[in-house]
Amino acid sequence: MGSGGLIGRKFDSSAPRVSRYETGKHEPDQETMAQIAEALGLPVAYFHATSDPLAKIILMVGRLPPKEQARISDLIERWIEKK
């Protein structure tokens, strides 16, 4: 079974509707997007990444505790300021 069926059952949405999200024919509202993200174990920001490297960074940092996320943010900010 594809992810559409699993996600659809997780938050009471039909598989065709989830398929329309996947193909870009329909965009979920914020609440639905949060439910999809939770069902897949992903941060909502992952779905808004504009590149694969950014999506990878979001996934990696999203797995860290908040204190470590702040440390990574500070490191990136300092690195950018040096350029």
Image (cartoon, rainbow, N blue to C red):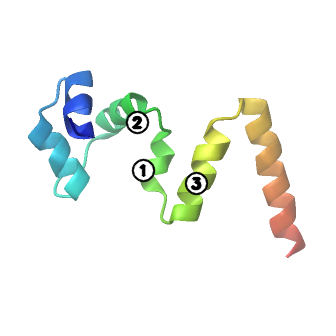
The residue nearer to you, when weighing 11 against 5, is 5
The 10 Å Cα crowd at callout 2, few under 14, some 14 to 19, many 20 or more, is: some
**Residue type (three-letter) at the residue carrying disc 3:** Lys
First-in-chain label (2 vs 1):
2
Whether residues under marks 2 and 1 lie with C-beta atoms below 8 angstroms apart, the answer is yes
What amino acid type should be assigned to the residue bearing mark 2? Answer: Ala
State the separation of the CA atoms marked 3 and 2: 15 Å
Mark 1: amino acid: Phe
Q: Position of residue 39 (x, y in %)?
A: 37, 29
Q: Are marks 3 and 2 in contact (CB under 8 Å)?
A: no
Residue at image coords 34%, 39%: 33
Say which residue label 1 marks: 47
Residue 82: horizontal and vertical position, in percent?
89, 71
Residue 11 visible: no
First reached walking from the N terminus: tag 1 or tag 3? 1
Task: Find residue 7 and report its horizontal and vertical position in percent.
Answer: 26, 31
The reply, left or right, for residue 47 in relation to residue 24 is right
Q: Give the answer, above or below, for where 81 lies relative to 57.
A: below
Q: Which mark is residue 37?
A: 2
Disc number for residue 56: 3
For the residue labelled by badge 3, is the local secondary structure a helix, a strand or a loop?
Answer: helix
The image shows residue 59, relative to residue 55, as above or below, that is above
Return the x and y of residue 53 as percentages of the image width and height.
58, 63
Packing grade of label 1 (10 A; few <14, some 14-19, many >=20) is few
